[in-house]
Amino acid sequence: MKPPAKNSPWKTFHTRPEDGSEAGDYYDSTESERYAESNAMRRIQRQLTLRALELAQITLSSSVLDAGCGTGFSLEVLKEVGYNRIAGFDAVPALLKHARAKGFTVKKGDLREIPFKDGLFDSIISVSALQWILAEKTVENASKAAQEFWRVLKPNGIVVIQFYPRSEEEAMLAAKAFRAKGFAVRLITDNPQNPRKRKVFLLLKKP
Ligand SMILES: C[S@@+](CC[C@H](N)C(=O)[O-])C[C@H]1O[C@@H](n2cnc3c(N)ncnc32)[C@H](O)[C@@H]1O
């Protein structure tokens, strides 16, 4: 995916780790510890998770999968809000060990190969993970994720994905891939004119 033009409202101000590497390469043991202990990361992930839940309106009795759960910051919020049937997966074992230490049920897996059985979950949330697989092979990888999200969801399942697309085009391609799979899709952008505060969400419903 090409970076946005210099005068684009989507231009980014710094290079991001997800622009040049896979999560498993970036989150080595040092970076995983730094992430796990960062109050700033925890605060941001909590805010994003609360906003995602506000948008998705998932009932408390639902089973919820956290796709790209990392150390479990979003899972902590789910638990505090009152969801009891929660699980997660992530590509990086060094992050997952922190989520396990917090008592969460988590597995190693990939957004393109989810390590759970078909039709297991009422809902999926994913916070700040999808952009990792969109830098290269954007359409192919978004389609694989759409296929996997569809597979593990029950009928009438709800999905909310917060992610950081590199451009409006990338956001639209991701939305299109989920729509092509059969999801009803809403693309919601908070603070669209402010690149530093912009937050993009995909709200999906499986019929
Ligand atoms: C910014 S962190 C957010 C983690 C989580 N939302 C939290 O509460 O901490 C992004 C996460 O996406 C995960 N990730 C990146 N690429 C992934 C992939 N292909 N499959 C699964 N997880 C992935 C990373 O390992 C990392 O844990």
Image (cartoon, rainbow, N blue to C red):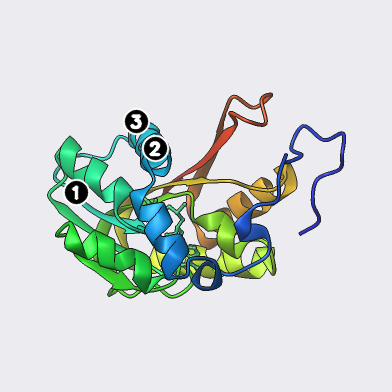
Query: Quick one: label 2, few (<14), some, or many (20+) residues within 10 Å?
Result: many
Residue 207 visible, this angle: no
Instruction: State ligand 1's quadrant.
Output: bottom left
The residue that disc 3 covers is 54
Three-letter amino acid code of the residue under disc 1: Ser
Instruction: Please name whichever residue, 70 or 188, is drawn nearer the observer in this view of the structure.
Output: 70
* Label pair 3/2, CB-CB below 8 angstroms: yes
Is residue 7 positioned above or below 86 on the image? above
Quarter assignment of residue 93: bottom left
Three-letter amino acid code of the residue under disc 3: Glu
Instruction: Please name whichever residue, 118 or 156, is drawn nearer the observer in this view of the structure.
Output: 118
* Label pair 2/1, CB-CB below 8 angstroms: no
Q: What residue lies at 21% left-to-right and 39% top-to-bottom?
A: 59
Secondary structure type for disc 1: loop
Does mark 2 have its CB less than 8 Å from ligand 1? Answer: no
Residue 17 visible, this angle: yes
Q: What residue lies at 15% left-to-right and 54% top-to-bottom?
A: 85
Q: What residue lies at 67% left-to-right and 59% top-to-bottom?
A: 19
Residue 138, x across and y down, in percent: 67, 63
Three-letter amino acid code of the residue under disc 2: Ala
The residue that disc 2 covers is 52
Disc number placed over residue 120 in the picture, else none: none
Is residue 27 positioned above or below 12 on the image? below
The residue that disc 1 covers is 62
* Label pair 3/1, CB-CB below 8 angstroms: no
Residue 41, x across and y down, in percent: 42, 43
Q: What residue lies at 69% left-to-right and 69% top-to-bottom?
A: 137
Q: CA distance from mark 3 to mark 1?
A: 15 Å
